[in-house]
Amino acid sequence: MTDAPPAPSYEGHQPLEIPQRALEVDLDQAFSQLLYRASLLQRLRADEAQTARATQRDLLGILVEVDDALAALGLDRELVLLGRGAGIEATRRRLLGRLAKAGVRPMRLEGLAADPALTEIVGTEPRFGVAPETVVQTVVTGFFWGEEVLRRAQVVVAAPAPEPEPVFAEDVERALAPEPEPGAAPDRPGEPGPEPAPGSAAVTPEPAAVTPEPEPEPEAAAPVNPARATTAPPRARRKGAATGGRRKRKK
């Protein structure tokens, strides 16, 4: 068994004196106090960071509302006519660039299913061939902030379209048939005639006036000559008859 090497001797140096207070300190208790102070400082730092993030979130929300105001001003015709539209659009692009550096980006939701965590439905629109609850229009743009939702979007979603009514051949023929003239009789027997225009009274056709034929007037009786109507005496009739007989004989 070898002996331990002797401790090095420092010539001219004296060993440090340990204070009596240090010898009386409880190391376990002192370490626990240090851990408590460290956790308290960490909690205070987390609260300050959370407060700062909430303040930053509010500021970004205000900047997003400023972007909405700039977009509305860009649609003002009077400002566009005054030549302010280009300046407003440039300011808006610069603002969106600053927001993008802070991690703020707009939502693109058209054609996607509406998510309650991202969208707020403000209206519906019937769309044929589009699944219900699908975003078809964005009214107010939503924004992300990193992985969080800075502002939800206000959207219009698709609603089930009404089923088309069945079409019959008679309806097609009736639609392709020329419109009858006002007052014309119906083409098919048993069908009612054309309805009168709204706001006008129904006109009933009056029967045609029948002109009575003139009755034949009675023929006027020939005027009676009192001289001819007088009956000849018997002698004159005999004389005339005798004269007629003589004439026949002469022939």
Image (tube, rainbow, N blue to C red):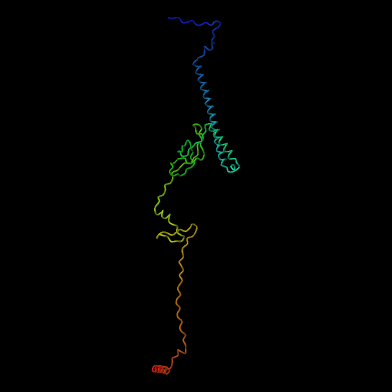
Task: Give residue 19's position: percent from left, percent from top.
Answer: 54, 11
The picture quadrant where one finds residue 95 is top right
Task: Give residue 178's position: percent from left, percent from top.
Answer: 44, 57
The picture quadrant where one finds residue 189 is bottom left
Query: Outermost residue toward the front?
Result: 251
Looking at the image, residue 225 lies above or below residue 206: below
Task: Give residue 206's position: percent from left, percent from top.
Answer: 46, 65
The picture quadrant where one finds residue 69 is top right
Say which of 147 and 240 sits in front.
240
Query: Outermost residue toward the right?
Result: 82
Q: Quadrant of the N terminus?
A: top left
Q: Quadrant of the C terminus?
A: bottom left
Say which of 47 and 243 sits in front.
243
Say which of 203 and 128 sits in front.
128
Looking at the image, residue 131 lies above or below residue 148: below
Looking at the image, residue 116 lies above or below residue 40: below
Task: Give residue 140's position: percent from left, percent from top.
Answer: 52, 39
Q: Tell how many labels.
A: 0
